[in-house]
Image (cartoon, helix red, strand yellow):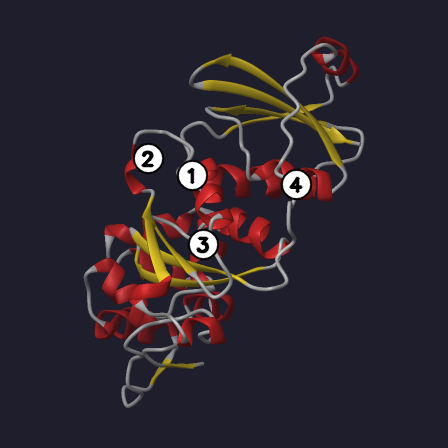
Amino acid sequence: MTINANTKISAILKHNPDALEAIVSISPKFNKLRNPLLRKLMASRTTISMASKIGGCSVNDFFEKLQPLGFGIDKLVKPDTLIQSVPRPEFMKNMTPENTSELDVRALLDEGKDPFNLIREKTNQLHPNQILKLINSFEPLPLIQILEKQGFQSYTEIINDNLVHTYFSKSDKVISNAAEPQINKSTDDWDTILHRYKEKLKIIDVRELEMPLPMLTILDELDKLPDDLALYVYHKRIPVFLLPELQERKFDYRIKEISESEVHLLIFKA
């Protein structure tokens, strides 16, 4: 396989899995790639050029590590100045300072707060052809899924590993009065359901994972969960983004709030 500055990391790892350790050895910032879910999320969206900016290294550092593994090197291809996962949509071409508002949620996330309600308030206030620029430390995939199902358009720019800009535009196809995720906080039958799945629980703890890994981890576990088992999740907050996905995938759930910083979820086939 011949690689250049614009080759996706996912293509490299697919061609030769041994490339993972070679890439990780380039910079400590690439240790995240050892996590399968983060690797799946990041590698498919990141090229060598982009990764070199994230890792504080050069494109040639990648070439030097990968060439001994049998990769051919094409140094003549010019790196993209800004790496995008998809072409810029039409609404981005009409973006101006006048029709764009910004919302930076990084401080809220650092405080352990969920910015979902604030983001929804801002998107609900958008008029057609207006744009919300969401400034975040990761690509908010769950939010994108929710809003796109309601007719919003979106576009993401990954600036570096700690800075992501996601743009939302309200088209004329937006579903008016779209239902917000309904949170079922009832614990009346918690013990009954827990007893039903006694000795048939898969237990995971996502409290220490960085966003958006909690949701991605839960969905990954549900993809592998046998129908007769339930997933018991230790979480630090009610995962609002997750609830519509559970309903769409035909899962039911119960939520038990233990404290302000601990929530237990019981997820099972509806």
N-term mark: 2 or 1 = 2
Name the element at disc 2: helix
Comparing labels 4 and 3, the label whose residue is closer to the camera: 4
Separation of residues labelled 1 and 3 (CA atoms): 29 Å
Q: Residue at x 47, y 68 (%)?
A: 16
| Residue kind at label 4, given as amino acid type | Ala
| Residue kind at label 1, given as amino acid type | Leu
Q: Residue at x 74, y 22 (%)?
A: 200
Contact flag, marks 1 and 4 (Cβ < 8 Å) = no
Q: Which residue is mark 1?
A: 118
N-term mark: 4 or 3 = 3
Q: Which residue is mark 2?
A: 108
* Residue 39's disc number: 3
Q: Which residue is mark 4?
A: 179
Where is 178 relative to 13, above or below?
A: above
Residue 204 coordinates in the image, percent (x, y): 56, 28
